[in-house]
Image: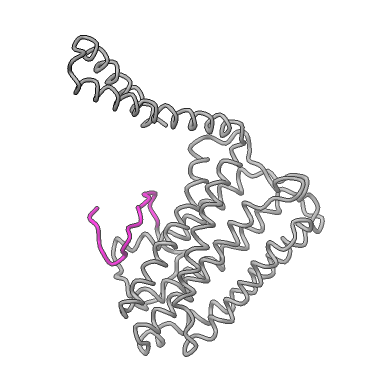
Amino acid sequence: MKDHLCALFESGAEFMRYWELSRKDPENLEHRKQMLQCMNETYRHANISYGLIDQTIEWCKKSDLAIIQEDWLEAKKLIDVALEDLAKIAANPTIDSKLDCEQGSSDEHESEQGSSDEHESEQVSVSDNEIDSKQGSIDEILSEHSSMNEEMTPREHGAHAARSTITICKLTRIFLNKITNTTASGPLFTLDPEINSKTLELLRQGPTEIAEQLRSLAKFLVDLHQKNRKPLLARNQYSRRLLKIPAYLKSTLLLLSLYHIPLPTTEVIHHSPPQNLFSSWFLSLLSPYHKATDCMLEALFDPQGFNSEDMFFDSEYLVMGSEYSIADSE
């Protein structure tokens, strides 16, 4: 809005200037022409500003959570697009049947996660069980990466990397479904009214950063697949963009655990106090998410073994470029 308001005042001032020049020199057609152009620009920016003001008024009526959830829903759309791209190159029947099985488990998890808003207690219980069941299959996949990477053709390697990335994308989508889900009676939780604007921005930013990283990675893998090149990334400072993914999730889960307030629709689940429901679900997601991230990184980097839980992440947020292979200067 700021840019359009500045342009509105600027074009309005120019209109007044040429109107005055045209009034003093009626025979000068150039002044009249410039005046009409400035008038049209003023009308255009005024109409845009009116619309943005109306949007801002409606936006101010929403709760903090509702505003953030709009960005989370956009992040979920990015994940859906990434999954579509990854599916194009992941369907290689000659490798990694275990990943197919693992993805099937993830699909089941997502289906059961969102199948019934009316039975939230059942949904949370199923989610916990499904998340736990993923850990064994991810461990098996991680143990095979080193030997498989040496034997793969570039397209087989790309398909393998895509399948590993699909796993983390689906876990991310499960998480986004959880924090954007509502029932017929309303949202499942709200945020502590004492939360400050900086924390709100961090909550908004975390899922968005994860989705943007994974979307860019999917585009990168599709591009390499078309060029028949292996998706091996150097272990350098630029790879931190991918390595930060579990850190974004962990910080988001921590903030949600601290500031979320479950609403009555989630009160009674196996006699657990409502404050513990989301927190326990968040904790159950962390381990498979780290392992799935390791699985993805093993497929993308030199296979020296990753443990994303032990990595150090600074607070700097890096902007994802369109090409992972191009090292932009810091």
First to last magenta residue range: 313-330
Q: Is residue 324 magenta?
A: yes
**At 34% from the left edge and 83% from the top edge, which residue is drawn?**
154
The reply to whether the magenta stretch includes residue 239 is no
Expressed as whole percent of the image width and height from the top left, the position of residue 31 reads 21, 20
- Residue at horizontal 48%, vertical 44%? 202
Q: Position of residue 25 (x, y in %)?
A: 18, 12
Query: What x and y, as percent, mark residue 121?
Result: 77, 58
Image quadrant for the N terminus? top left
> Taking 161 as reference, is 190 above or below it?
above
- Main SS type for the magenta part? loop
Q: Is residue 50 left or right of residue 125?
A: left
Q: Residue furthest front?
A: 27
- Residue nearest the observer in this picture, 259 or 55: 55
Q: Is residue 163 above or below residue 325?
A: below
Which residue is rendered at x = 35% and y = 56% of the image?
320
Observer-nearest of 190 and 70: 70
**Location of residue 312 (image quadrant):** bottom left
